[in-house]
Image: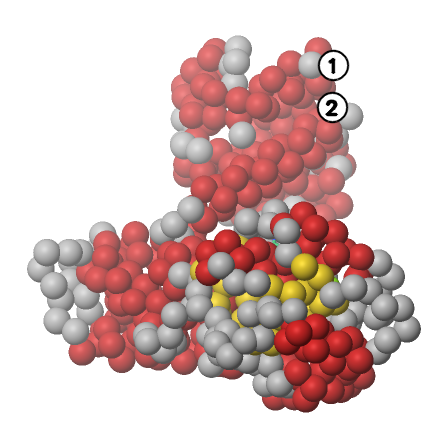
Amino acid sequence: LSERLSGVFDRLTKQGALSDEDVKTALREVRVALLEADVSLPVARDFVKAVQDKATGQAVTRSITPGQQVVKIVHDELVHVLAGDPEADPGKLKIDNPPAPILMVGLQGSGKTTTTAKLAKRLKEKEGKRVLMASLDVNRPAAMEQLQILGTQIGVDTLPIVKGEDPVQIAKRAKTQASMGGYDVYMLDTAGRLHIDQELIAQAAAVRDVANPRETLLVVDGLTGQDAVNVATEFDDKIGVSGVVLTRMDGDGRGGAALSMRAITGKPIKFVGLGEKMDAIETFEPERIAGRILGMGDIVALVEKAQATIEAEQAEKMMKRFQKGRFNMNDLRMQLEQMLKMGGMEGIMGMMPGMGKLAAQAKDSGFEDKVIKQQIAMIQSMTKVERANPQILQASRKKRIAAGSGMEVADLNKLLKMHRQMSDMMKKMGKGGMLKQAMKGMF
Ligand code: GDP
Ligand code: MG
């Protein structure tokens, strides 16, 4: 998402004034980018419309470029949607009238138990509150013990485990214990399911009716994208949610869930989970998430890293094929396309150790973008079988391919010769382990 958006805005920046058409084109790309980031369709559409309305009426500011101006409008609108009520303080929970019940709901594995403990620790350390935690998870073996262990670790009390109780009974006992023990807050960590189902909802609703929570926090895995919105809508309709905690925001998730969740449920995102450790939780900051969605924050580094990983994997794959002596027309075509990207034959050869001479030759033979493009066109005119086995190319096939790509048979012969030479070279280098070195320099 971020790379894509930066690209759009770079292009805008290069132009003079901000025309209607500029804005429209840029926003079309923004919409696609949002969808790719798992923002739901109606949300992306509304978002783009809101930005367009705002941008269209605005005079071009002289001190900044048009591109910067659109970035600012998009950014401000993102922050606006993400933040919601400007009066609301996302880091604050309603915990007056002790003991205040907090109900934690969400799908299994979303991070409810972890978040329960993280929040308890925070309330204790930042606000000096006495917190009691209770696990209502009677479904999963050892779920109650999990919360108990975390409690010991962070120095927060947990409700003693009594086997055989149902969630409603546990909630009642937690309430009594919290009142009698003089706790400020008691937190109810419910069971989850892998998918939302009526039994799960009914159970959570029964607990809600007993506890009458001051806060019902929906814990959502920030990496789940579109699905997150369905889950949020369902929980909010059936149980009533007062706030959202987005977990796993330490991963390279796209942040799209945050936007659709806010736009569709209207519920405030209160906290973000940033890891497995007990301190890895922070107050939700709309600016930070907006920056992340737009690629202006720390996400840029993550995206670059991902890109590097993908390219390294591709290089590795190709290398394995070369070492086995498999270098067909598809591989050549990929190489040629890569060359175009990297500044032609000279550029690419210059990067490979020991290839200086070849690079000079390439230059002499007029190896320019135009030639590379013609070569790619010839490969495109080949059938699948021909690309995989170029040795089958006899006179009639050659004529057809040359005609199909608007070239001469002589040009095709040159291409085939180059392929043979490269193929031989790859084989030799593969045996000597040189290929690996060379490829390292290339990618
Ligand atoms: P529950 O089934 O909803 O109670 O989920 P858990 O609290 O047991 O968490 C499931 C897994 O997700 C555990 O391994 C947690 O350590 C991990 N987890 C929870 N929150 C985060 C987070 O914000 N970031 C990361 N990286 N892992 C998390
Ligand atoms: Mg749990």
> In the figure, residue 175 lies in which quadrant?
bottom right
| Mark identifier at residue 431 | 1
Residue with the mark numbered 2? 323
Q: Residue 391: horizontal and vertical position, in percent?
A: 74, 33
Q: How many marks?
A: 2
Amino acid carrying label 1: it is: Lys
Q: Is residue 78 left or right of residue 191?
A: left
Nearest the viewer among 202 and 279 is 279
Q: Residue 40: horizontal and vertical position, in percent?
A: 53, 74
Identify the element where label 1 is drawn.
helix
Amino acid carrying label 2: it is: Gln
Instruction: Name above or below for residue 388 compared with residue 207.
Output: above
- Residue contact at pointers 1 and 2, CB within 8 angstroms: yes
- Residue 247 in view (yes/no): no
> In the figure, residue 238 lies in which quadrant?
bottom right
- Residue 209 in view (yes/no): yes
Ligand 1's quadrant is bottom right
Nearest the viewer among 404 and 324 is 324
Nearest the viewer among 294 and 171 is 171
Identify the element where label 2 is drawn.
helix
